């Protein structure tokens, strides 16, 4: 069974926590260390960002991290090599998050084949058109048993959400707002109403809420309305400030009060 599916099938009532970091930032060689540290410290799933020069969905924190990573020489090929080096030691789901241009340049077939070889269970491609996903990407991803995770926002129609739910597997990524990534102090009533509305749709796939989660209040709001939460910008900032995954996770847990 794909590790993403296994995670959600066996979580029981436990709420999940997934962290994002950008491969190659703050140092290009840190990817294996960060992944193994997060696994040891109890993180349920890890999103590894593939740096790109024009990350449209990302806020300044992750954009800056991507710039640093590219300057450090991080490439998709380098990332795959690093992941291969810890393949036998990783037991939690790894999800690659990257933009279409990089993956197309690598080649869809080569990309998904390499994902399987290095232990990647899924990918998120924010700028992948859904029609292209259905006609081109999904058949290849399915052949390699890699989950392609789709995002929904408060502006996504119910019809579209149900269509996405029907044609994807793994989980649905609920973007907390239509804005770019970045930490928030709290979710306003409109965002909470959106969470509750999607919760009430009783989708087939489990949901993870991301964008803006940085403290106990936003974490608890996400946990209340979904299977788990995804934290990106806050952890990226702490990892850059400390240069050490253990110290960064210490400070994150302190901020989240968990």
Image (cartoon, rainbow, N blue to C red):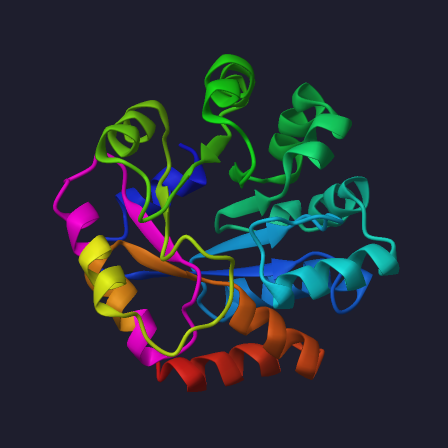
Q: Quadrant of residue 36?
A: bottom right
Q: Is residue 245 visible?
A: no
* Front residue of this view, candidates 81 and 229: 229
Q: Magenta part of the protein: which range? A: 196-219
Q: Is residue 131 left or right of residue 64?
A: left
Q: Is residue 74 left or right of residue 84?
A: right
Q: Residue at x 51, y 38 (%)?
A: 122
Residue 186 in the image, given as x and y percentages of width and height: 33, 76
Count numbered badges in the picture.
0
237 part of magenta stretch: no
Residue 121 in the image, given as x and y percentages of width and height: 51, 38
Q: Which quadrant of the rendered structure holds the N terminus?
A: top left
Residue farthest toward the left in the current orientation of the protein: 200
Residue 45 in the image, given as x and y percentages of width and height: 46, 54
Q: Is residue 24 left or right of residue 179?
A: right
Q: Quadrant of residue 140?
A: top right
Q: Residue at x 54, y 59 (%)?
A: 20
Q: Residue at x 71, y 23 (%)?
A: 110
Q: Which quadrant of the rendered structure holds the C terminus?
A: bottom left
Q: Quadrant of residue 149?
A: top left
Q: Is residue 129 visible?
A: yes
* Front residue of this view, candidates 125 and 242: 125
243 lies above or below 26: below
196 lies above or below 109: below
Residue 178 in the image, given as x and y percentages of width and height: 41, 52
């Amino acid at each position: 069974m794909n590790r993403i599916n296994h995670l959600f099938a066996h979580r029981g009532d436990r709420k999940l926590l997934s962290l994002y970091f950008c491969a190659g930032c703050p140092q290009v060689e840190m990817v294996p260390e960060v992944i193994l540290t997060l696994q040891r410290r109890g993180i349920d799933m890890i999103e590894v960002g593939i740096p790109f020069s024009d990350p449209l969905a990302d806020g300044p924190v992750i954009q800056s991290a991507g710039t640093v990573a590219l300057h450090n020489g991080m490439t998709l090929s380098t990332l795959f090599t690093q992941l291969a080096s810890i393949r036998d030691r990783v037991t939690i789901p790894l999800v690659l998050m990257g933009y279409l241009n990089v993956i197309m340049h690598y080649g869809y077939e080569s990309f998904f084949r390499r994902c399987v070889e290095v232990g990647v269970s899924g990918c998120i491609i924010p700028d992948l058109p859904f029609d292209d996903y259905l006609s081109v990407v999904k058949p290849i991803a399915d052949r390699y048993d890699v989950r392609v995770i789709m995002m929904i926002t408060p502006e996504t129609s119910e019809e579209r959400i149900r269509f996405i739910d029907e044609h994807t597997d793994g989980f649905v990524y609920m973007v907390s707002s239509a804005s770019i990534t970045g930490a928030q102090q709290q979710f306003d009533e409109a965002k909470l109403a959106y969470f509750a509305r999607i919760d009430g749709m009783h989708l087939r796939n489990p949901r993870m809420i991301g964008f803006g989660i940085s403290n106990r209040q936003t974490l608890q709001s996400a946990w209340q309305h979904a299977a788990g939460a995804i934290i990106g910008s806050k952890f990226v900032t702490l990892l850059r400030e400390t240069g050490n995954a253990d110290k960064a996770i210490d400070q994150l847990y302190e901020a989240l009060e968990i």
